Image (cartoon, helix red, strand yellow):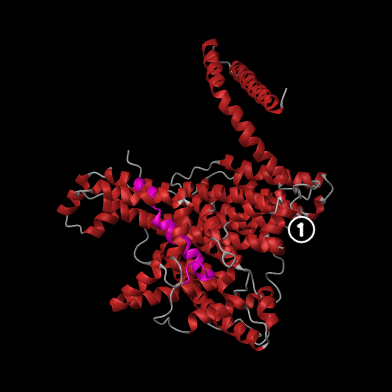
C-alpha cells in the first residue's frame, strides 16, 4: 500500500472513530440525564423527554467539553507552571501571576504597559465609537430619497475594516508627510481661521495627554498626582449632591459611586493579596469577609431592606478554603492570623444574629470600615506612622508635601514610601458617600454638614495634589537634566507642552508613540457601522407619539433627545457599551497589521501581548496566566455593568 492510500485509510478510520465516539457519547449523556431525572422523582414520560433532549444536544455538549472546557482547564493548570514548548514543565505556583500583576522584570513591565494601552482603548475609544455610531444612526433615521444607499455606505467600513488592504490604506493615508489625512487637515486649516485654531489645540492636547499617559504606562513616578483622581471623584460627586434638595436620585447616585469604588478597592486588595510573597491567608480571609459584608451593604440600597444572607456564603467559603489549604499544608500557623479570623468573623456573626435591619445597618457600616482598615494596614504596613499623615493638614491648607525637591532619589522612590497610599483616599470617598446614602433623609442637617465639609476637604485635596504634582514634575525634570539622567517621558511631556504648535506641525499618526493609539481609535470610529445598526433599530422602535406630545409641550430638540430618545434606546446603548468594552480589551488584528518597530510597545494590547508570549516566544505558562487575567477582568467588568444598569429603561 502506497503512502497516499495509507493516509486515506487513516483519515477514514479517524472519521469513523469520531462518529462512533459521538454516537456512544451521546447515548451515555442521554442515559446519565435520564438517571438524574429519575433521581429527582420525575415521571416516566418526563424521563423520556429528558433522555431524547440530552441525546440530541449531546454532540454540542461533548464538543464544548472537548474543545472549550478541556483546553480552558488545561490552560488554567499551565498558568501555574513554567511550561515552554520543548522544555520540561515544572510547577511554579503564583509566580507567573506575581510577575505580571506586580510588573516585575521586563515582561511584567510590558504586560503593565499593554494593560494601560487596553484601558486607553476602553476609556477613550469606546465612548467615541458609541457617539459616532449614535450620530450616524440618527442621520440615517431620517426619511429621505436614497437613504438605503447611505446606509450601505455607512455600513461598508464594517466589512472592509478587518481586511489587511483597508488597514494598509489607512497607514498610507496617515503618513506624516503627504498623507491624505494631514494634507486635508492642513488645507482646511489654511482656509478657515477657526478650524486652524481648533486643529492646533487638538495637536497640543493629544500630545500633552498622551505623553503624560505614556509615562504612567511605562511606570514613571507620578508623585502627588496619585491623590488627584480620588479627590476629584469625591469632590465632583459631592458637588452634585449638595446642590438643591436631597432626592432619591441623589441617594442612588451616592450608592452607585460608593459601591463602584468599594468593589474596585476589594478587587485591587484581593489581587495584591494573591500575589503577595509569601501568601497571607489571614489577609485573604479578611478580604473574603469584606466582600461578604459589601454584598449585604449593597442589598441595603433596596428600600424594603431585605438582606440576602446567602450572599455571605461564596466569598467566605473561598477565603476559608484558601486558608485551610495553607494551614494544613504547613505553610503558616493559626496563631499568625487569629486577629484576622476574629476581625472577619465578628461583624459577620453580629449581622447574622441582629434582630432587625435597623440593628444591622450600623454593624454593616462599622464592620466594613474596620475590615478595610485592617486589610490596608496588613497589606501595606506602616501607613499610620512615620509622619505619613502629615500630608493631610498640608494639603488641606494648600501646602506642599515635597520635602526634598532637590533630591532625585527622593522624587523617584522616597516620596511614595513616605506618603500614604492613595487607597486610603478611595476608601474615604466610599465611606463618605456610603454614609450619606445610608443616612438618606433621616438626619438632613447633619448629612448636609458632612457633605459640605467633605466637599471642601476633597476640593482642597484635589487642588493641592494637582499644584504639587506640577511642582513635582518640574523639580524631577530639572534635577534629571542637571544630573544627566533625564526621564524620557518627562522630557517628552515638556517638549509637547513647551510651545504652541505652529503651522508646519502635523500629527505623526502611525510613526510616533503619541499618535499611535489615537490612530487606532480613529480607525475603530470609522468602522462603527455595527453599533450604528443596533442604534438604528432602537430608534425605529421609539413611538412617534412621544415626540409629538413633547412638541405640544414646547420641548426643543435637545430636550427631546435627552428626555425621550436616550431613555428609549438605553437597552441598545447598554448592549453596545458591553460589547465595545469586551472588543476593546481583545483588540488584536488591527494592532498586528498596523504596528511598526517604533510603535509596537505603545500599540500592544493585552491580547497582543498574549499572542507574543504564547505563539512567538512559546512561553505557554505565562501566556495562559495572561489569558486568565484578561478573562477575569472581562467577567468582572461585565458583571459590574449588569449590576449597575439601573439607567437602562426596558419598556413593559
Tell me, yes or no, whether the highlighted magenta stretch contains residue 528: yes
Residue in the image at 46% along x and 56% along y? 167
Q: Which residue is mark 1?
A: 277
> Residue lying furthest right in this view?
330
Name the quadrant containing residue 471: bottom right
Residue in front for this viewpoint, 374 or 115: 115
Residue in front for this viewpoint, 294 or 267: 267
> Residue lying furthest left in this view?
552
The local secondary structure at tag 1 comes to loop
Is disc 1 surrounded by few (<14), some (14 to 19) or many (20+) residues within 10 Å? few
| Quadrant location of the C terminus in the rendered image | top left
Name the quadrant containing residue 212: bottom right
Asked whether, in this view, residue 460 is left or right of residue 485, the answer is left
> Residue lying furthest top in this view?
44
Tell me, yes or no, whether the highlighted magenta stretch contains residue 275: no
| Quadrant location of the N terminus in the rendered image | top right
Residue in the image at 48% along x and 66% along y? 233
Q: Is residue 524 above or below residue 176?
A: above
Name the quadrant containing residue 19: top right
How far across and down, in percent of the image, does residue 355 sit? 56, 43
Visible residue check, residue 308? yes
Q: Is residue 540 above or below residue 5?
A: below
Visible residue check, residue 289? no
Asked whether, in this view, residue 488 is left or right of residue 168, the answer is right
How far across and down, in percent of the image, does residue 421 sit? 63, 69
Chain part drawn in magenta:
508-534
How far across and down, in percent of the image, does residue 227 sit? 56, 71
Residue in the image at 52% along x and 77% along y? 466
Residue in front for this viewpoint, 33 or 631: 631
Amino acid at each position: 500500500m502506497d503512502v497516499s492510500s495509507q493516509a486515506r485509510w487513516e483519515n477514514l478510520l479517524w472519521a469513523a472513530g469520531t462518529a462512533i465516539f459521538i454516537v456512544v457519547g451521546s447515548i451515555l449523556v442521554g442515559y446519565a440525564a435520564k438517571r438524574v431525572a429519575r433521581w429527582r422523582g420525575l415521571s416516566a414520560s418526563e424521563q423520556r423527554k429528558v433522555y431524547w433532549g440530552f441525546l440530541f444536544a449531546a454532540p454540542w455538549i461533548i464538543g464544548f467539553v472537548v474543545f472549550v472546557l478541556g483546553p480552558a482547564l488545561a490552560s488554567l493548570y499551565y498558568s501555574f507552571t513554567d511550561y515552554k514548548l520543548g522544555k520540561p514543565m515544572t510547577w511554579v505556583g503564583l509566580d507567573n501571576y506575581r510577575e505580571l500583576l506586580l510588573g516585575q522584570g521586563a515582561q511584567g513591565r510590558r504586560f503593565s504597559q499593554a494593560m494601560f494601552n487596553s484601558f486607553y482603548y476602553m476609556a477613550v475609544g469606546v465612548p467615541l465609537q458609541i457617539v459616532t455610531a449614535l450620530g450616524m444612526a440618527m442621520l440615517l433615521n431620517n426619511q429621505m430619497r436614497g437613504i438605503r444607499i447611505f446606509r450601505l455606505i455607512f455600513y461598508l467600513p464594517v466589512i472592509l475594516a478587518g481586511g489587511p488592504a483597508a488597514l494598509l490604506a489607512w497607514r498610507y493615508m496617515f503618513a506624516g508627510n503627504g498623507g491624505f489625512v494631514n494634507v486635508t487637515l492642513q488645507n482646511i486649516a489654511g482656509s478657515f481661521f477657526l478650524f486652524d485654531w481648533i486643529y492646533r489645540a487638538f495637536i497640543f492636547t493629544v500630545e500633552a495627554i498622551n505623553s503624560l499617559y505614556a509615562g504612567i504606562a511605562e511606570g514613571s513616578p507620578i508623585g502627588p498626582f496619585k491623590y488627584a483622581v480620588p479627590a476629584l471623584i469625591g469632590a465632583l460627586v459631592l458637588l452634585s449632591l449638595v446642590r438643591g434638595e436631597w432626592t432619591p436620585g441623589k441617594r442612588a447616585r451616592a450608592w452607585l459611586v460608593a459601591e463602584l469604588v468599594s468593589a474596585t478597592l476589594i478587587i485591587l486588595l484581593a489581587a495584591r493579596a494573591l500575589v503577595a510573597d509569601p501568601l497571607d491567608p489571614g489577609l485573604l480571609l479578611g478580604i473574603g469577609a469584606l466582600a461578604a459584608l459589601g454584598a449585604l451593604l449593597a442589598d441595603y440600597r433596596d428600600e424594603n431592606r431585605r438582606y440576602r444572607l446567602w450572599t455571605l456564603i461564596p466569598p467566605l467559603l473561598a477565603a476559608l478554603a484558601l486558608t485551610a489549604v495553607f494551614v494544613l499544608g504547613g505553610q503558616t500557623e493559626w496563631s499568625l492570623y487569629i486577629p484576622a479570623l476574629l476581625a472577619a468573623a465578628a461583624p459577620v456573626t453580629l449581622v447574622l444574629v441582629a434582630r432587625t435591619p435597623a440593628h444591622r445597618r450600623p454593624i454593616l457600616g462599622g464592620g466594613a470600615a474596620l475590615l478595610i482598615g485592617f486589610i490596608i494596614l496588613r497589606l501595606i504596613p506602616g501607613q499610620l506612622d512615620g509622619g505619613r499623615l502629615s500630608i493631610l493638614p498640608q494639603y488641606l491648607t494648600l501646602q506642599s508635601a515635597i520635602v526634598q525637591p532637590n533630591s532625585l532619589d527622593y522624587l523617584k522612590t522616597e516620596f511614595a514610601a513616605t506618603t500614604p497610599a492613595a487607597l486610603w483616599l478611595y476608601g474615604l470617598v466610599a465611606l463618605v458617600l456610603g454614609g450619606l446614602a445610608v443616612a438618606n433623609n433621616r438626619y438632613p442637617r447633619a448629612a448636609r454638614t458632612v457633605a459640605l465639609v467633605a466637599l471642601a476637604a476633597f476640593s482642597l485635596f484635589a487642588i493641592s495634589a494637582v499644584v504639587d504634582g506640577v511642582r513635582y514634575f518640574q523639580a524631577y525634570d530639572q534635577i534629571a537634566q542637571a544630573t544627566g539622567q533625564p526621564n524620557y517621558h518627562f522630557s517628552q511631556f515638556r517638549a509637547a507642552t513647551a510651545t504652541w504648535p505652529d503651522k508646519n506641525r502635523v500629527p505623526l499618526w502611525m510613526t510616533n508613540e503619541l499618535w499611535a493609539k489615537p490612530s487606532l481609535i480613529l480607525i475603530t470610529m470609522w468602522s462603527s457601522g455595527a453599533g450604528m445598526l443596533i442604534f438604528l433599530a432602537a430608534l425605529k422602535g421609539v413611538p412617534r407619539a412621544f415626540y409629538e406630545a413633547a412638541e405640544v409641550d414646547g420641548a426643543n430638540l435637545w430636550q427631546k433627545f435627552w428626555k425621550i430618545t436616550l431613555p428609549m434606546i438605553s437597552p441598545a446603548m447598554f448592549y453596545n457599551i458591553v460589547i465595545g468594552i469586551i472588543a476593546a480589551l481583545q483588540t488584536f488584528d488591527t494592532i498586528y497589521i498596523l504596528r511598526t518597530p517604533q510603535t509596537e510597545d505603545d500599540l500592544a494590547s493585552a491580547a497582543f501581548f498574549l499572542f507574543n508570549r504564547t505563539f512567538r516566544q512559546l512561553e505557554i505558562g505565562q501566556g495562559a496566566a495572561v489569558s486568565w487575567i484578561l478573562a477575569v477582568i472581562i467577567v468582572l467588568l461585565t458583571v459590574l455593568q449588569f449590576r449597575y444598569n439601573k439607567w437602562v429603561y426596558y419598556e413593559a
